[in-house]
Amino acid sequence: MSVKVRHLVKQYGTQRAVDDLSFEAHKGEVLGFLGPNGAGKSTTMKIITGYLPQTEGSAEVCGFDVTDQSMEARARVGYLPELNPLYRDMYVREYLEFTGRVHQVPNLNKRIDTMVERTGLGSHRHKQVGALSKGYRQRVGLAQAMLHDPEVLILDEPTSGLDPNQIVEIRALIQELGQEKTVILSTHILREVEAVCHRAIIIHKGKLVADSPIGELQQRFSAQHR
């Protein structure tokens, strides 16, 4: 498996944002990470990416421990946070060049051309990031997350604030990426998971409450609402 989380705990004072959470995510799978706002989804993702340390438990990316082998684990992750922290004064291509140099991407210009094409940024690549709509800024965020060709993509609310057409396009791209990579997609919207994911885990108050293929979850919810 590409991502393995075991008995993960993140404590802030007396509050447990993540409470003994365990799950796995596999290559060729889009895993939905579903739960209400404040459930612990973003905290878990930040621990997997190495952005936050855990209080207890462990997380591995492609066999590398995110604490003891942090740089090896981070090199294999592409991350799109919910609040996409782009440099708005940079031009799209300039920003991707900067990101690519940080990751020491080989054949950088060719790789940028590929990502610009794949994310539909072709006609916007010479614009300033700050001049783009929210949808196109999300595309820039996806392009930078994929630029170094990571094995694992972690996407936190990737369609938040997009219009319906943009949502359809981003969902299609995520499904395409899920055929070759491990994708973990966090959302609080059930329809998002149903549209894109193969499997979903549901957490509430930091605890795992379900881990099933999408079809099984749909049947369970349908039975509860009859």
Image (spheres, grey):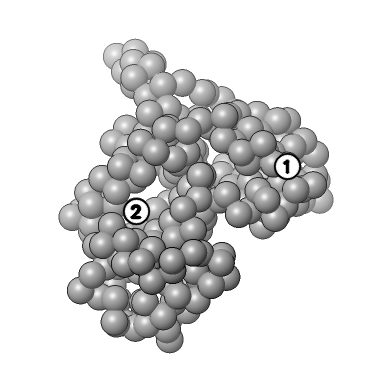
Q: Measured from the top left, where is residue 61 in percent x and y?
A: 63, 41
Q: Quadrant of the C terminus?
A: top left
Q: Nearer the viewer, residue 211 or 203?
A: 211
Q: Amino acid at mark 1?
A: Asp
Q: Which residue is identified by label 2?
A: 159
34 versus 100 height, above or below: above
Secondary structure found at label 2: loop
Q: Residue furthest bottom?
A: 89
Type of the residue with mark 2: Thr
Q: N-terminal of the two: label 1 or label 2?
A: 1
Which quadrant of the figure contains the N terminus?
A: top right
Which residue corresponds to the image point at 28% horizontal and 57% vertical from the top-left?
118
Residue 195 x, y percent position in the rendering: 28, 36
Label placed on residue 65: 1
For label 1, the crowd category at 10 Å Cα-Cα, with few meaning under 14, some 14 to 19 and many 20 or more, is many
**Picture residue at 29% right of the left edge, 82% below the top:** 127
Q: Is residue 190 above or below residue 117?
A: above
Residue 183 sits in quarter: top left
Binning the other alpha carbons within 10 Å of mark 2 as few (below 14), some (14 to 19) or many (20 upward) gives many
Task: State whether residue 136 appears in this view.
Answer: yes
For the point 77% across and 36% down, the residue is 57
